[in-house]
């Protein structure tokens, strides 16, 4: 058993705290993008995910993710139910690359990943969903989709088998492809907002959006650099690649907007930031700083173009979960197959195509991306249709048009909002 490494432990506790901050950051990001009558509801969807997943992860989530393998799909939920056995020895350590980090700290870090992943999905379905149905979905989805995916990719499960070891440093498949596919499936099951495509549904508070993007960028250093599992050179590399790719994606998105629309917007800057963060997530510890520039630039351009697909294809992915997280996650996962700098970054992995490794790692990355899409789509659809047939997903048309904040939560974000309309002051 390794000795406790206090430096690594302090870094991982800090990283876990940074990742937890990402979910309130996401609430601001999403909150600014919806209409004023719905801002509290969408923010509550993120906070609700924190409440539900925070409890479930301790009970069976960690065990289903990292417990003993069952059929290659999930860990045994009884192994560490309620985190039993982790405090049998006061100095019990989880050996993550021999980093000397206590098991409880690893649990804390991983719990924050589960929370943010579920919260991401809410961006595809705001302004029209029953809060109770969302909370039930959170519990079901994290149990039957997220935990198995985490086990299959990070816990020694099915998706670790292939022509080479899949490389997903911090969650391209587990987090972003997973959430992006789920968002698309729910958008299709639940349907469009009233007036989608016919009336303007502009962001009501762009400063909120930019604040949320800033908090996400800050928290993402825990997400990516923390995934090194130690305060080491790989963490430093991940910090740099995260910064550079995000900056490049923002520039790529803004350039695309300027060429296409004639304006570089604050919403585009914030969205480009998130697209870059998403794309570099699976690659952060495996690529060079120069490689990360290309990953980010391509992500910014591709995601800026992808967000318009919802209008062409007719689905209401309201806050662009598909265009940013699914498309960005797919590109990021595949980019490792091009830009990974060396063999055996994880034992059994190969260098990327541009670094002499041939097509092997690229093929492996494509396989895990396709598998993640298929698994998430099928299980999310099952959960989504069960909720639709039992509790139902949608609020009434009257509530949706009048304002979901007042009807569902009994409050409004702004004093002059009543039933979704601006109330003129009479003096």
Image: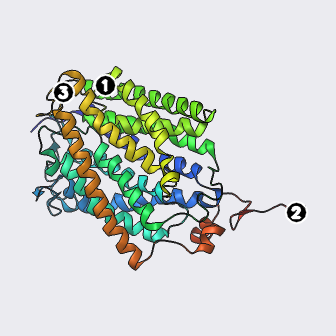
Give the side of residue 106 with respect to residue 305, left or right: left
Q: Nearer the viewer, mark 2 or mark 3?
A: 3
Can residue 348 be seen in this snapshot? Answer: yes
Image location of residue 125, percent across then percent down: 48, 60
Which residue does the numbered mark 3 point to in the structure image? 351
Instruction: Give the mark, 3 or 1, whose residue is nearer the N terminus.
Output: 1
Q: Residues within 10 Å of mark 1 (few under 14, many from 20)?
A: many
Q: Quadrant of residue 338?
A: top left
Q: How many marks?
A: 3
Image location of residue 213, percent across then percent down: 51, 40
> Given contact means CB atoms under 8 Å apart, are the residues at marks 3 and 1 in contact?
no
Instruction: Give the mark, 2 or 1, whose residue is nearer the N terminus.
Output: 1
Q: Give the SS element for disc 3.
A: loop
Q: Quadrant of residue 93?
A: top left
- Residue in front for this viewpoint, 266 or 209: 266
Point 22% across, 46% down: residue: 368
Give the side of residue 183 with respect to residue 312, left or right: left
The circle drawn on residue 237 is 1
Give the side of residue 71 with respect to residue 386, left or right: left
Instruction: Give the mark, 2 or 3, whose residue is nearer the N terminus.
Output: 3
- Quadrant including the N terminus: top left
The circle drawn on residue 426 is 2
């Amino acid at each position: 058993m390794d000795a406790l490494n206090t430096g690594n432990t302090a870094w991982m506790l800090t990283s876990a705290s940074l990742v937890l901050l990402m979910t309130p950051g996401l609430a601001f990001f999403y909150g600014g993008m919806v209409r004023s009558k719905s801002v509290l509801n969408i923010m509550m969807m993120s906070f609700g995910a924190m409440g539900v997943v925070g409890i479930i992860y301790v009970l069976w989530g960690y065990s289903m993710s990292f417990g003993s393998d069952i059929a290659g799909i999930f860990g045994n939920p009884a192994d560490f139910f309620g985190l039993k056995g982790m405090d049998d020895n006061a100095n019990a350590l989880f050996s993550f690359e021999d980093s000397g980090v206590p098991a409880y700290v690893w649990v804390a870090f991983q719990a924050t990943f589960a929370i943010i992943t579920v919260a991401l999905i809410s961006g595809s379905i705001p302004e029209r969903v029953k809060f109770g149905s969302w909370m039930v979905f959170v519990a079901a989805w994290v149990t039957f989709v997220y935990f198995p995916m985490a086990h299959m990719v990070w816990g020694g499960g099915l998706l670790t088998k292939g022509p080479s070891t899949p490389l997903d440093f911090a969650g391209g498949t587990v987090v972003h492809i997973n959430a992006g596919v789920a968002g698309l499936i729910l958008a299709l099951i639940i349907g469009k907002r009233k007036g989608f495509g016919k009336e303007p549904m502009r962001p009501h508070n762009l400063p909120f959006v930019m604040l949320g993007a800033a908090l996400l960028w800050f928290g993402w250093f825990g997400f990516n650099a923390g995934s090194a599992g130690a305060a080491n050179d790989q963490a430093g590399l991940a910090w740099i690649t995260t910064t550079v790719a995000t900056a490049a994606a923002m520039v790529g998105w803004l350039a695309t907007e300027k060429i296409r629309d004639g304006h570089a917007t604050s919403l585009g800057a914030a969205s480009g930031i998130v697209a870059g963060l998403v794309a570099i997530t699976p690659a952060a510890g495996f690529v060079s700083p120069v490689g990360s520039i290309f990953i980010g630039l391509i992500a910014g351009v591709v995601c800026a173009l992808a967000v318009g697909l919802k209008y062409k294809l007719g689905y209401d992915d309201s806050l662009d979960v598909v265009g940013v997280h699914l498309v960005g996650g797919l590109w990021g996962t595949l980019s490792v197959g091009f830009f990974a700098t060396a063999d055996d970054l994880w034992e059994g992995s190969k260098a990327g195509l541009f670094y002499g490794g041939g097509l092997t790692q690229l093929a492996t990355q494509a396989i895990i991306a396709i598998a993640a899409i298929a698994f998430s789509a099928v299980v999310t659809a099952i959960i989504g249709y069960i909720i639709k047939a039992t509790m139902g997903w949608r609020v009434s048309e009257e509530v949706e048009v009048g304002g979901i904040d007042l009807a569902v939560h009994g409050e409004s974000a702004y004093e002059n909002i009543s039933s979704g309309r601006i109330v003129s002051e009479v003096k």
